[in-house]
Amino acid sequence: MTAEFSRQKEISREILPGITQEIRGSIVLTRCPDFTVQVALARSHQRDSIYKSFMPDGQRNIVSAVDLEDGRYLVVNAPPEITVRKKLSEARKNSEDSDAVYVVEYKTEGLWLLVQRLYGKATRHSHYGAVEAFTLLEAEEYGIHDEENDKTELFSTNGLPKFVDIRKLGQDHQCFSYKWPSFALIVLAGEDVKHDLLPSLSEEELLQRAERYHLTASAIYLPPRHHPLGD
């Protein structure tokens, strides 16, 4: 019964040919052409169980953990060329204009794999030579704003990881998380992962656009109202 339940929880997607992801319970597995990476959030007493649940990769992966300094850990199964910080306070920013820090990092010319912790807002940018895929490990109202298309979506995980978005070539986006710190696994892949920076929106602007977008979406799907005495 447990195995059957686990199979029902497996979710997969392809980011690009040769790059795929699976969600297996609390574990997110990313397969790249040359390696696999598995990550999961866990409390201290859950770490051994997560270690045992990692899929055997037949490679030279190392199991390590980032101390998130709140009683939880990010447990990581990855090859040694992927940087895994020992604790959250050692995480680094990619930009001084962003509130995002990264506890796991792998960067090459055609592939970035990151675990982001965001409390605030990131830069607004696009990638004309790459796609960017987001998987939320934990989030409450993690926002992805697209200024060009006037679209702002909010995502929450509700206890399990969630695939939320793949930004296509050239798609404008700015991420934010103001309600609670969020953790996201980000895969950026393509011929050129260069960031084309765009003017960032402020906290007030992002929250206003999120509220406006969701009010509009609610109005679109609002069921028709009927007179209490009938039509």
Image (cartoon, rainbow, N blue to C red):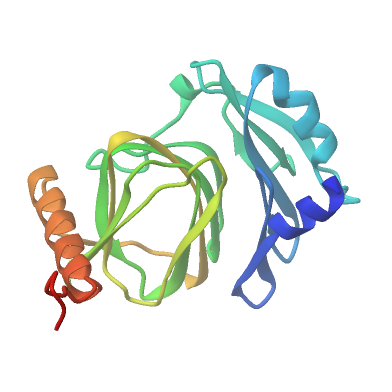
Q: Position of residue 100 (x, y in %)?
A: 35, 39
Tell me: 200 left or right of 111: left
Q: Is residue 50 visible?
A: yes
Is residue 136 shown above or below 111?
Answer: above
Tell me: 132 left or right of 97: right
Quadrant of the snapshot with the C terminus: bottom left
Q: Position of residue 189 (x, y in %)?
A: 53, 67
Tell me: 11 left or right of 136: right
Number of numbered discs overlaid on the protein picture: 0
In this view, the residue in front, 188 or 143, is 143
Tell me: 221 left or right of 169: left
Image-quadrant location for residue 216: bottom left
Q: Position of residue 212 (x, y in %)?
A: 11, 61
* Residue drawn at (52%, 22%) of the image: 68
Is residue 168 shown above or below 2?
Answer: below
Q: Which residue is most to the right?
A: 58
* Residue drawn at (41%, 47%) of the image: 156
Image-quadrant location for residue 224: bottom left
Q: Is residue 201 visible?
A: no
Q: Which residue is most to the front?
A: 229
* Residue drawn at (38%, 64%) of the image: 194
